[in-house]
Image (cartoon, grey):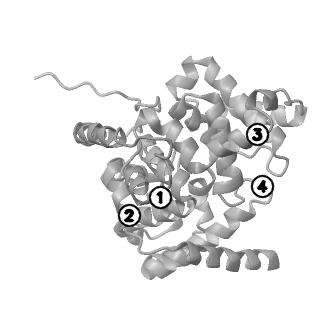
Amino acid sequence: MAQPMYSKVDEYGFERTENFNYQFHSEFMEKYMRILVRRGMRWATLKGKNKYAKGGKLKRFIRKGVPIDLRAEVWMHVSGAQARKESNPISYTDLKKKINNPALIEMIKIDLPRTFPDNINFLSQEYLIKQMFDVLATFAHQNSDVGYCQGLNYITGLLLLATKNEEVSFWLLKELVENILPKYSVTNMSGLLVDLDVLDELVKKFDPEIHAHVHKIGMPWAMVTTKWFICLFVEVLPTETVLRIWDCIFYEGSKIIFRVGLTLIKLHRDEILRTKELSELIECFKEIRNHKEVMDCHQFMMNIFKMPGKITDNELQRLRLKYSKTQNQR
């Protein structure tokens, strides 16, 4: 009997890892394609100018996944990026004309070839590199507080692959950095430092045994989770899982990052607790993308709203305020 042929790259052009479970992925995709068809039919029932007005129905739809062909439109509306674009007195085309800072330009150009070097789309379609430069440079020139920060290249690259639209990618990046996420990308990364402390406290609250184990081994959360916050799980989790996470981040905000992080820790609880030393623990976190319930993005997204426990906006705000004060005292 002939063996089935498996692609070594995913649907977005990313190379699969050496230990990728092709058999499981094939079985999952057969099931997931039926889910996508059903979800597409449900999304087709949303009509009218207020179809993306926030509410319980739209939240349920987004948590169950935005159809690929609707992502650009849905993300723009539910994130606030569309309203920002329409109210901005200067168009993206005119903002692009303001790219003139040699230092920023050089910094971005250095990072471009390092971004997704094995992605077949970026290797074969030079215009994607040009689009990524234009989005990053335009953003850097109009936001002096952030300028350019490593990590934005990964977010921008995936935005371009997902939306297939340069201008949409710019407005979504702007909305993410300036409104949805805390100050992860400013020079002192104050928002990142605060949220690493918040994550530590949430782990202690929801799984004190894991918290004690990680601290006993002496692993700072920054060592394995910085990319969760800075790159929004790009190159950490399978691409479709990342995009499903982004569906929810654009609608519900940065709280989703903690839900995802805590769920990853819960799913790998036994493996984490079996580790004896720092190198083993770090390796354990590197392997999280290969867990079957992480590859099954539909099941994983259901898990993030059940497994971690209750995380309210008020609690998150309180913790961020608490650790902002702590950071200021250091």
Pointer 3 local density, CA inside 10 Å: few below 14, some 14–19, many at least 20: many
Q: Which residue is mark 4?
A: 186
Q: Quadrant of residue 88?
A: top right
Q: Who comes first in sequence, dot 3 or dot 2?
A: 3
The C terminus sits in image quarter: bottom right
Left or right of 113? Residue 252 is left
Whole-percent x and y of residue 230? 63, 53
- Type of residue at label 4? Val
- Tags 3 and 2 touching, CB below 8 Å: no
Whole-Å distance between the Cαs marked 3 and 2?
Answer: 37 Å
Secondary structure at badge 3 equals helix
Towards the viewer: 233 or 182: 182
Check if mark 1's residue and mark 2's residue have beta carbons within 8 Å. Answer: yes
Query: What residue did someone put label 1 on?
Result: 285
Instruction: Count all numbered tags in the image, as a single digit.
Output: 4
Amino acid tagged 3: Phe
Residue at image mark 2 = 268
Residue 218 can be seen in this image = no
First reached walking from the N terminus: tag 3 or tag 4:
3
- First reached walking from the N terminus: tag 4 or tag 1: 4
Give the image location of residue 329, x and y in percent. 81, 79
- Helix, strand or loop at mark 2: loop
Between tags 3 and 1, which lies in front? 3
Please say whether residue 278 is visible from this viewpoint. Answer: yes
- Please report the residue visible at 62 percent of the width from the left and 42 percent of the height from the top: 82
Instruction: Identify the amino acid type marked 2.
Output: His
Q: Quadrant of the N terminus?
A: top left
Determine the secondary structure under disc 1: helix
Choose mark 3 or mark 4, whichever is in front. Answer: 3
**What residue sits 36% from the left and 64% below the top?**
267
